[in-house]
Image (spheres, rainbow, N blue to C red):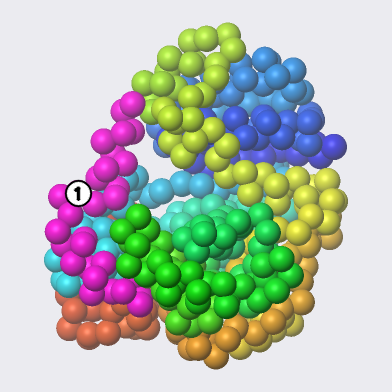
Amino acid sequence: MARIKLAYLGGGSSRAAGTMASLIWHGKEFEGSEISLIDLDPDHLEVVRSISEKMIADAGIDMTVTATTDRRAGLEDVDAVLSSFRPGGFAARALDERIPVKHGVIGQETQGAGGFFMSLRSVNVLKDVVADLNAVAPNAKIFNYTNPVNIVAQAVTQYSDVELVSMCEGPIVFPPVILKAAGLDPARASVTMAGVNHNVWSTEHLYDGEDVMPLLERAWAERKNDPTLDANSRRALHLAVTMGSIPSDYFNYYYFREELLREQQGAAKTRSEVIMDSIPGYWEHYREQATLDNPVLDPKRSRGGIHELELAIDVMSAHYNDTGAILPVNLPNAGGALPGFDEKTVVEVWCSVDKSGFHILPQKPLPHSVLGITQQLAEYQILAAKAGWEGCRADGIRALLANPLIDNLKVAEELYDEMAAAHAAYLPERLLK
């Protein structure tokens, strides 16, 4: 099994305990490995380190864990970096969600203006991580979960020589939302999705080996006025039937924009503010477990549950153990494998993963009904990556205007300036001028 040295950027986050539980669950696949937890918060780091060491001992796994706030020291001689951090924490995310709504624009963690400013903060940190790796671990690969994963991947792969692959469970979790809304069993379906992260569509959608669309059309006709169907599922089912393709439910923000904006404007708290109310309880639970010899995480008291970032762990295992597993990843569109997108564009597609790398499976083109918006989001992704890595305010304005959620120049300029000022502590000076 793979013996690696892995650095975990974000090793003191509220998701870190669950991620370590997941890694230990897969521990036999990484016997003899060393995990370096890296974070800015020494107290949270120590809690996660203590829980991890005790879970490792209880599981009888040969694995060591260290913790440090010195990023470069933690990255020295690593084979792999698991990146999952949030610059500015949930307070910054709350600004990403709250400020756009003031300007009549959707406020969301990875979409639109909120996602754009999160990408600027994330890329700003990862640019320094790349410099650190070039100095102390030049052969390391980054397995990225830092959002927005597509823009982060676009920036690092386009502007550096460090190999980075991003992960997101979207292509796995989006189809069941619509299938369940239609009263169908997801286990009987085979759905292949492609596009850019959080903005993928199905290119093949089978149910018991047959096209699922007639079943979805029938279900929509029967259930569109069903009061038991939640709003998100109703919108996603409606959109799938209209477009003839199963969508990421993030597309609800684009195709039901006014409806969702009104909901955001009327909400007492943003999603981030709701999460922040729960954060102290997570850490109370982690501290309790850190005092025990055999800690057990309670899924109801842990951020995101107890098997976090498992897709990233699956991808790392497939690569370092040379398994050839078929998994969804975000990486440059080598050879133009996904029709309609150029080779440098980072796309989200299913790949086979082995020791030699990440190999995109043969791709069908996106339907014409959904190709245009996905291409627009891909072009926005490229512009956002440029702004984050080397750009200025003007590049930022251009990127915002390329996003379908922001189609007014004056709004884009005012929104950029207010959000840049709000996030100034996490942005380079070139983006503030």
- Residue 329 image point, x, y percent: 64, 62
Is residue 417 visible in the rendered image? The answer is: no
Q: In the shown orientation, is residue 379 left or right of residue 426?
A: right
- Name the dominant secondary structure of the magenta segment: helix
x then y, percent, for residue 56? 67, 21
**Left or right: 315 as drawn, with respect to 183:** right
Residue farthest toward the front in the current orientation of the protein: 222
- Examine the image and state in which quarter residue 422 appears: bottom left
Residues drawn in magenta: 253-281
Residue 137 located within the stretch drawn in magenta: no
Residue under label 1: 269
Q: Residue at x 43, y 14 (%)?
A: 288
Q: Quadrant of residue 112?
A: bottom left
Give the answer, above or below, for where 316 lies relative to 372: above
Q: Nearer the viewer, residue 394 or 341?
A: 341
Residue drawn at 67 percent across, 29 percent down: 24
- Which quadrant would the N terminus be assigned to in this image? top right
Judging depth in this view, the residue of 349 and 427 nearest the camera is 349
Q: Secondary structure at mark 1?
A: loop
Q: Amino acid at mark 1?
A: Lys
Neighbour tally class for label 1: few under 14, some 14-19, many 20 plus, Cα within 10 Å: some
Residue lying at 71% horizontally and 66% vertically, measured from the top left: 208
Q: Is residue 269 magenta?
A: yes
- Quarter of the picture containing the C terminus is bottom left
Q: Say whether residue 77 is visible.
A: yes
Give percent across and percent down for residue 253.
34, 70
Residue 66 in the image: above or below residue 380: above
Q: Residue at x 68, y 15 (%)?
A: 57
Q: How many marks overall?
A: 1
Residue 16 place in picture, x, y as percent: 51, 35
